[in-house]
Every structure is written in structure tokens, then in C-alpha cells.
Image (cartoon, rainbow, N blue to C red):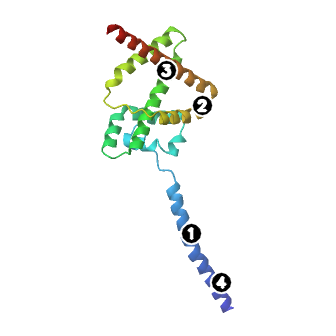
Amino acid sequence: MRGLDQNRAGRTATILFAAIPALVVAALLGWRMMPKPAPPPNGDPVQIAKFINTSQFESLSEYDKKQYMRTLRKKLPDVEKAANEGKLSRSEYAYAVENAWMIRQLEHMEAYYQLPEGPERQKYLDSLVEKGSKSTGNAVPTIKNEGMREEIAKRWLASWPEDRRKQWEEFRRVSHEKKQAATRAAGAATKGAA
């Protein structure tokens, strides 16, 4: 009987010695995989710039994403300063800039579709083109990464219903046409003045 008890005790000890490290490793992996708490939407722009490049951000609702992106857009000079100080990588900075572009486009699109079709929408597009031509002297340099912009837009469009995707495509088309027409008109005016 005594040998049987020792045998059981030996097996129990072996199981414990094997199980405890496995449990510790599993707990550490679980802890590392747990999502970190999201920064507040109106919080530190550097933390937001880092956060928007995570799967946790991608899992948020459109409404919640917009809150972060609006803060980022308003505080873009702070984000640029942080990138220059090495607090953000160049890719994190570029991603932040392109997300700021995206929220601006979404706001423009929503304002455009709130207007009745016709002259009011055209006037709104004219004002956007005019504002865009005046903003070339921005304090924050314009980094244009078309591939990144396209990827960000695709992520947004993937979660939208078909009618909203069509609105986006239509808005991008008409605003692009308006910008091209303004560029041609400016070029013709320059040639005429020479």
C-alpha cells in the first residue's frame, strides 16, 4: 500500500511540475494577446496615431473610428512634431496623415449628400476646390501616399452597404472632375495672361 501511495505522489508531482510551467506560459500568452485598452478618442494624438494602425481600431464601429480620426485631423501638427522627435515611425505618421485625409473626405461626402441635387451641390464642390487650392500653404506638409489612401478607403468601403459605396464612388468622381476642370481653367488663364 505504501508503494502505491508513493507512486501516486510521484505521478502527482510529475503532473504538477509539467502543468505549472504550461499554465504559466498559457497565462503569459493570453495576457500578451489581450487587447490593450484603447486611448480616449479625444486623447493624446500620438497614442491615437499608433492605435489607428491596429486590428483593435479596425474592429470599431464607423462612428467610433470617426471620433479618433477627427481628433487626429485636428491635432495633425502635434503628430508631425512627434514623428520628427522619433515618437512615431514614418509609417505611423504617414498612416495618420492618410487617415486624416479620409475623415476629411467622409465629412465632405456627407455634407455633399445633405444638399439637394443641382446647383447647391455644384457650389459646394466649387468651394471645396477653392479651399483646396488655398490650402497649399498648410503648416503640415501634404504627404500623399495614393496606395495607402486606396487601402484605407477599401477598408472603409468593405464595411459599407452597396448604396453608400456608390455614393462614395460618385462623390470621388464628381469632386475629381471638378478639380480637373479648375486646374484646366487655371492653366488656360495663365496662358492667356502670358
Q: Where is residue 9 in the image (x, y as percent from the top left)?
A: 62, 84
CB under 8 Å between callouts 3 and 2?
A: no
* Tag of residue 176: 3
* Tag of residue 8: 4
| Mark positioned earlier in the residue sequence (2 or 1) | 1
CB under 8 Å between callouts 2 and 4?
A: no
CB under 8 Å between callouts 2 and 1?
A: no
Instruction: Mark 3 vs mark 2: give the one in front.
Output: 3
Q: Please name the residue shown 56% across and 67% down the image.
A: 23
Q: In this view, does 174 lie above or below 140?
A: above
Q: Please name the residue shown 47% across and 33% down the image.
A: 146
Using the numbered discs, state the Cα–Cα distance from disc 4 to disc 3 in whole angstroms.
78 Å
Amino acid under disc 1 = Ala
Instruction: Mark 2 vs mark 1: give the one in front.
Output: 2
Q: Which of 89 and 180 is in front in this view?
A: 180
Q: Please name the residue shown 49% across and 35% down the image.
A: 147
